[in-house]
């Protein structure tokens, strides 16, 4: 009996020690993407303090702004031993760092109801998880999805306060836009047209190609109406657009910093009343000051002669929410911490603010926004779009009454769809749904690196100095030498395989 009691006491002691160890706080690190106009420090944010109390997991964030993301990411991967546990809220090249180098952790074995009940329960709604697996069939990231019936990113805007003053009607053609910009310049508007030069963002200058029938995106490809993949910068409309932009640049109708500035500088000029024409995401709850919204209205994209508008369109498929690196000390704890953010109310609070202050449950049992802080104030106290969120369309509409800024974007998307100004098929078919083999993906990525450098340098040169037949032909020849034809062929093959499925 004494031996049995001793064994039982020893067993209890071991179990007690195990329980104590299990209850010890987990310490993790995160490489966290942050918008240029987002200054909130996640390390001192009440939302993550509450999340830590719920999960017993403390996360130390390294906040990285958009302009520094690529450089800092490459430096981080250069020394795998010092990689953080998680990479949050901005895309990473899965084929390179996951499939090829093994620096990202495959997550399939952890995608269980026990570890990630919130996430797993939504993966099959609207086939939301279909685009996530890589070319090797493995899952390397937790998806981020906020489906809201939106089909495009950039919306066109005119400073109607200035246009009304000058008795200018809403422009429908590029010639009318040019005439409007000249009148605004003569009236003292410093930058009749202004844009940013970020890799993404609805205010970026590259959106202007849509008015010339070329759906522009950062990968330089699109699908035409014959189901053929085309090189954007090889099209006649692409040349016509840079020739028009050169005219604006040469006449002082375009903000010259549109070729260099970030979204913050651009927004400052808009809010100072210096800009008359631009593209942007929406007006409500953005970097545009609340008292400035009344000065602008959205319009359909004006078109050049002989062209049909081709606004780059989007599919509501998941983007990157979170990756675990191969260095992750505790994958289960990390994924439970991520999944805790996806609990319905926690997720809605992360996006909108506290229940009773910014959101309420209405009579239909849906979360509804009751207070939207002015001047982008949400960034001051909630993660907003840079937290974790996963809401396929059917699920989201069942829990959420769209806020005014969401309704605004939806209405613009509806208008663009009804006007037929969207590209034939979204570039997401190539970027997200058409999967290449690892070998083909690496080849396409290598070509893209050189192609991207050439296109960006040529674009800036054409806008500043104009285009001649000689400079245009040299540009096309250089693209050919880099391998643009092979680049397009690789995507065509992947797209054909997708269609065959």
Image: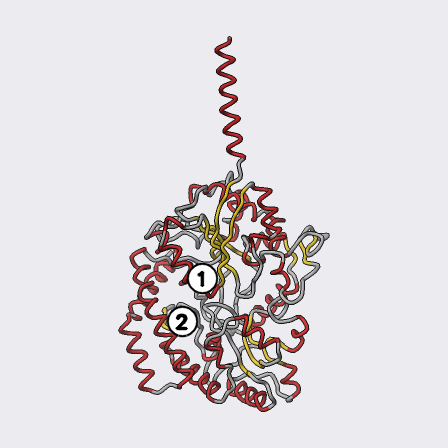
**Which residue shows up at 64% across the image and 81% down it?**
160
The answer to whether any part of residue 441 appears in the image is: yes
- Residue reaching furthest to the top: 1
Q: Position of residue 315 (x, y in %)?
A: 49, 62
Please indicate whether residue 411 sits to the left or right of residue 319 in the image: right
Q: Which residue is mark 2?
A: 224
Q: Position of residue 128 (x, y in %)?
A: 49, 53
Residue 221 sits in which quadrant?
Answer: bottom left
Residue 54's disc number:
none
Dot 1 crowding, Cα within 10 Å, few <14, some 14–19, many 20+: some
Mark 1 or mark 2: whose residue is earlier in sequence: 1
Element on which disc 1 rests: helix
**Which residue shows up at 53% across the image and 31% down it?**
20
Residue at mark 1 to residue at mark 2: CA–CA distance: 32 Å
Tags 1 and 2 touching, CB below 8 Å: no
**Which residue shows up at 65% across the image and 61% down it?**
403
When the figure is inspected, residue 286 is found, relative to residue 10, above or below; the finding is: below
Please indicate whether residue 200 sits to the left or right of residue 288 in the image: left
Colouring style: secondary structure
Q: Position of residue 42 (x, y in %)?
A: 56, 54
Q: Which residue is mark 1?
A: 69
Please indicate whether residue 373 sits to the left or right of residue 417 in the image: right
- Residue reaching furthest to the left: 481
358 or 133: nearer the eye? 358
When the figure is inspected, residue 201 is found, relative to residue 209, above or below; the finding is: above
Quarter of the C terminus within the rendering: bottom left
The answer to whether any part of residue 310 appears in the image is: no
When the figure is inspected, residue 401 is found, relative to residue 342, above or below; the finding is: below
Element on which disc 2 rests: loop
Dot 2 crowding, Cα within 10 Å, few <14, some 14–19, many 20+: some
């Amino acid at each position: 009996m004494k031996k049995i009691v001793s064994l039982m006491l020893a067993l209890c002691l071991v179990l007690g020690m195990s329980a104590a160890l299990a209850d010890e706080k987990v310490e993790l690190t995160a490489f966290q993407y942050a918008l240029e106009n987002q200054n909130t420090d996640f390390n001192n944010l009440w939302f993550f303090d509450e999340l830590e109390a719920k999960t017993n997991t403390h996360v130390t964030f390294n906040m990285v702004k958009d302009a520094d993301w690529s450089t800092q990411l490459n430096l981080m991967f250069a020394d795998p031993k010092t990689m953080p546990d998680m990479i949050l809220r901005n895309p990473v090249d899965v084929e390179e760092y996951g499939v090829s180098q093994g620096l990202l952790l495959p997550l399939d074995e952890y995608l269980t109801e026990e570890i990630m009940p919130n996430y797993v329960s939504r993966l099959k709604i609207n086939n939301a998880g279909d685009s996530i697996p890589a070319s090797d069939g493995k899952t390397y990231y937790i998806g981020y999805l906020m489906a809201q019936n939106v089909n495009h990113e950039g919306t066109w805007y005119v400073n109607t306060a200035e246009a009304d003053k000058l008795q200018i009607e809403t422009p429908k053609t590029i010639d009318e836009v040019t005439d409007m910009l000249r009148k605004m310049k003569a009236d003292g508007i410093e930058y009749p047209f202004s844009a940013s030069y970020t890799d993404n963002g609805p205010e970026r200058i590259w959106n202007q190609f849509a008015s010339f029938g070329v759906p522009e995106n950062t990968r330089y490809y699109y699908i035409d109406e014959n189901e053929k993949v085309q090189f954007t910068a090889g099209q006649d409309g692409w040349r016509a657009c840079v020739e028009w932009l050169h005219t604006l640049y040469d006449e002082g109708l375009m903000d010259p910093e549109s070729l260099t500035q970030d979204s913050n500088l651009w927004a400052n000029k808009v809010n100072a009343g210096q800009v008359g024409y631009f593209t942007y995401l929406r007006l409500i709850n953005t970097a545009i000051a609340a008292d400035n919204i009344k000065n602008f209205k959205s319009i359909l994209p004006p078109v050049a002669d002989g062209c049909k508008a081709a606004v780059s369109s989007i599919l509501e498929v998941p983007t990157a929410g979170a990756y675990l690196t191969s260095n992750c000390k505790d994958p289960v704890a990390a994924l439970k911490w991520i999944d805790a953010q996806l609990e319905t109310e926690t997720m809605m609070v992360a996006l909108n603010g506290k229940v009773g202050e910014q959101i309420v449950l209405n009579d239909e049992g849906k979360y509804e926004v009751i207070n939207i802080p002015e001047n982008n104030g949400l960034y001051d106290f909630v993660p907003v779009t840079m937290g974790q969120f996963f809401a396929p369309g059917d699920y989201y509409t069942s829990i959420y009454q769209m806020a005014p800024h969401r309704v605004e974007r939806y209405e613009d998307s509806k208008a663009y769809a009804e006007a037929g100004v969207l590209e034939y098929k979204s570039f997401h078919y190539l970027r997200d749904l058409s999967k290449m083999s690892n070998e083909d993906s690496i080849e396409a990525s290598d070509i893209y690196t050189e192609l991207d450098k050439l296109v960006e340098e040529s674009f800036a040169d054409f806008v500043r100095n104009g285009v001649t037949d000689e400079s245009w032909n040299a540009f096309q020849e250089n693209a050919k030498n880099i391998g643009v034809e092979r680049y397009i062929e690789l995507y065509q093959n992947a797209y054909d395989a997708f269609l065959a499925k």
